Image: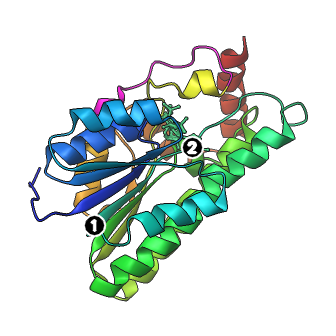
Amino acid sequence: MKKVNNGEYAVITGASSGIGREIALVLDGIGYNTVLVARREERLRELKGRMKNKSEIICADLSKENDCARVSEQTEKMNVQVLINCAGFGAVGEFAELSLENELSMIDVNIRAVHILTKLFLRRFKERDSGYIMNVSSCAGLLPGGPLMATYYATKAYVCSLTESISAELREQKSGVSVSSLCPGPVDTEFNSVAGAGVGMKGITPKECAEYAVMEMLSGKTTIIPPGIMKAACKASKLVPAKLTLSVISKYQNMKLN
Ligand code: NAP
């Protein structure tokens, strides 16, 4: 991958774990300075200690609107060229049974924080007509729905739809700014344990996911689906009735509950 070394910064949310952590390492590896965002400060400090280039940490709870605004304010003086919206989580179970409070917090992190940060950074990037935003969605966002993970799938559909639309606006304007959504299938991270799920399908490693995602983002791809069985499944789902896809997803999510 092409190296950068012009004092450019990449802001990565969800950098304390999994995919976000690995994306931060890949971006540091190609020369970006990094701003690492999450709630768990110790994890961020440990990661900062591994970075070759300049690195700052911002402890923020992105379910809170003020904390989202603070991420933008604290990076205002930096030459930020990349925003990765990776923070997010899910919950497995029947919609009627899952905690409303937890789901509203999920909507705040998976949708509201992505929406706020995308808008605030896009305004900055458009001023100088350059920059990359990558919103970490999921294959879930490309499918018709997800029984037993209904809210999570719906949040990711929002992210895919929002990103596609902004990307089309920027294309029309022949903008130098690029917006992408990353739509992985299973990735082996802490995601399942946070979601209250048992072991699901074997995933790719977060490092594989991150390397592929950064390469595709820098090439200006709008929808990024890492290679694997879910890439084929997303394509196949377009060819069969939604009810069939939903019943397959239901069986898959049910396995995680047992
Ligand atoms: P993970 O290892 O659990 O990482 C989740 C990250 O989100 C952590 O850094 C966590 O940081 C951060 N986060 C959660 N709630 C937050 C909050 N309120 N404020 C700030 N940060 C918060 O899971 P992951 O798999 O890497 O997930 C990263 C993204 O990939 C998510 O958006 C997820 O939906 C998506 N994804 C995952 C998979 C998969 O199979 N793993 C597949 C498709 C898409 P703190 O807890 O330190 O705050």
- Look at the image and say whether residue 247 sits in the magenta stretch: no
Residue at the limit of the structure toward the right, as seen here: 96
How packed is label 1: few (under 14 Cα within 10 Å), some, or many (20 or more)? many
Q: Quadrant of residue 47?
A: top left
* Residue 65 position within the rendered picture, expressed as x and y whole percent measured from the top left: 65, 62
Whole-angstrom CA distance, mark 1 to mark 2, is 22 Å
**What main secondary structure does the magenta stretch of the protein show?**
loop
The local secondary structure at tag 2 comes to loop
| Residue 117 visible in image | yes
Mark 1 touching mark 2, by CB under 8 A? no
State the residue position of label 1. Answer: 81
Mark 1 C-beta closer than 8 Å to ligand 1: no
Residue at 58% from the left image edge and 49% from the top image edge: 141
Residue at 25% from the left image edge and 39% from the top image edge: 25
* Residue 35 position within the rendered picture, expressed as x and y whole percent measured from the top left: 34, 52
The one nearer the camera, 216 or 46, is 46
Whether residue 93 sits left or right of residue 174 in the image: it is right
Residue at 21% from the left image edge and 39% from the top image edge: 51
Q: Which residues are magenta?
A: 196-209
* Residue 250 position within the rendered picture, expressed as x and y whole percent measured from the top left: 72, 29
Mark number, residue 88: 2
The quadrant of the image that shows the C terminus is top right
Q: Quadrant of residue 106?
A: top right
How packed is label 2: few (under 14 Cα within 10 Å), some, or many (20 or more)? many
Query: Where 37 falls versus 205 (above or below)?
Result: below
Residue at the limit of the structure toward the top, as seen here: 258
Mark 2 C-beta closer than 8 Å to ligand 1: yes
The residue type indicated by label 2 comes to Gly
Q: Quadrant of residue 108?
A: bottom right
Query: Where 153 falls versus 97 (above or below)?
Result: below
* Residue 48 position within the rendered picture, expressed as x and y whole percent measured from the top left: 29, 38
